[in-house]
Image (cartoon, helix red, strand yellow):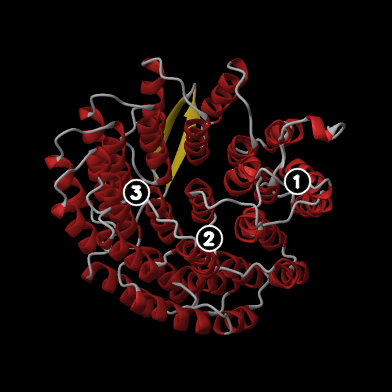
Amino acid sequence: MFVKLHSLSFNSIFHKCKTMKQFKEAHTQLVVNGLTHPSPSLRPIISFAALDPSGDIDYALLLLLHQPSIPPLLFLFNTVIRGLARAAGDRRAFLTTSLLVFNRMAELNLAPNNFTFNFLLHGCSNCGAFDLGRQFHAMLIKNFFYMDVFVRNSVIQFYSVCGKLDDARCVFDESDELDVVSWNSMINGYVRNGDISEALNLFGKMPKRSDVSWNSVLGGLVKFGFLDNAYRLFMEMPRRTLVSWVIMISGHAQNGHPKEALALFREMLSLDQKPNSAVLVSVLSACSQLGALDHGNWVYSYIQKEHLMIDSILSAALIDMYAKCGSIGLAMQVFKSSKVKGVSTYTAAISGLAMNGHGKEALQLFERMKDQGISPDSVSYLAVLCACSHEGWVDKGFHYFNSMFDVYGIRPELDHCACMVDLLGRAGLLQEAESFITSMPIKPDSAIWGALLGACRLHGNAEMGQRVGHMLIKDDKYHDGRYVLLSNIYAESMKGEDAEEVRKTMRKRKIMRVPGYSLIEVDGAVHEFLAGDRSHEKTER
């Protein structure tokens, strides 16, 4: 690549580079051969280092600020600022570096333009640098860029992302010129901050709605659980894009309405709309919730027939579906046939093995994942702890629980702690379980205390059960399961009067026990049966 270097133009050298490593090697050869001029040839390496996902923003900064031959070109400074904005996960780093670049521009008498401020505000939005963003807003006004609708949209977006909706609305209302991006930015701000009412109000006033406008409001309604309103809006849409279908199907699946998710999927196919991976993952989630194995098999067949790429996320969804439908053999077949095995794929298989009573195999797969150089995440550890809980492996459970932070720096969350309480409770170590709860670094929620209450009934510890049960009822007066468990604990410890008193309290507070139900798939149709309900057409009279 570097033979007869002197005969090649600088640009042709860099145009052959496809990776950051190649760019650095090419730059090194230029420096070694004393061929660092003319400096404009360094534009490609700065652009790649700053903007490419595999680039190196620090290298771009090094070239821009410390390479004497770099000319004071606004394009190069804007490119690096744009790269900093994209990588603005670390707030302190962005504050330091962006100001360094911006001040260097001032030293070179290089006046910023509207793109400069757009990228700076984008970076402030990404890392929540509100005070710095306000300063840039002030500079915009001072430098007369404020009249540019492109810049104003950036300001609206900045305030919206930072949760300062009053400031965003003030900029919006004061604008002489508004385009569809202005409206969408403001509507997205209301949606992002949970003000669906105002988002709908502004959407109703919008002179011209784009697909993004419709989908923003639709996504907000789904996100906050207004599924009926979302469906009505969905039916009013002049054009339902793939994004619209993703929002509706995934929203219903995630909000516990799997039947409706499958119905929407069938409607989507009837309209000759091609589902993407996001739709199929949501459909498989709905099948998992319903135990609809036939539906799940059909989805897998569709994926194979259409030759769709099965990435690690889709593979994990397939494994999870088969595991939750009780077909662990098929789940492991999918796992073994997966060409790309990421942490999500391994986690789905580990969780599937654990829930189907194969705890030993689950832990073996977890260790194999680590041997493959794949670091576990918090969900992986949750699957492992569930396996230990199901198998009653107390010592192994604590080993893995402690290794989360000690080895991988993963802080245990409430779900991990609930698994540990369940593990101790199943093993009959109730005192240890209560001590674990009271010594948790995070405040335990009612689910964790509820796990202890269930263990108290399982092992007949009436004294602890009564104490924990009354505490839970005091914290949540309308949770029917707490009353039922406490009543059962009293009844099983021969305290019938106390059990009846708990039931009286339920009736007084008009708390109805939610009946259990079963889902059964017959010939591809999912039937739901409530306990004690004889209204289903197939019920024997």
Q: Tag 1, which secondary structure?
A: helix
Asked whether 131 or 523 is in front, the reply is 131
- Indicate the position of residue 308 as horizontal and vertical percent values: 60, 23
- Residue 393 vertical placement versus 161 (above, below): below
Foreground mark, 3 or 2, reads 2
Q: Can you give x and y, in whole percent of width and height, for residue 377 in the image?
A: 66, 57
The residue that label 1 is drawn on is 27
Name which quarter of the figure residue 428 lies in: bottom right
Tally of numbered tags: 3
Give the Cα distance between marks 1 and 3.
Answer: 48 Å
* Apparent side of residue 301 relative to residue 5 in the rendered image (left or right): left
In the rendered image, the vertical position of residue 453 relative to residue 523, given as above or below: below
- At 34% from the left and 48% from the top, the residue drawn is 223
Could you classify mark 3 by the number of other residues whose Cα lies within 10 Å: few (under 14), some (14-19), or many (20 or more)?
many
Q: Which mark is residue 89?
A: 2
| Mark 1 neighbour density, 10 Å: few (under 14) some (14–19) many (20 or more) | some
Which residue is at the front of the view, 48 or 123? 48
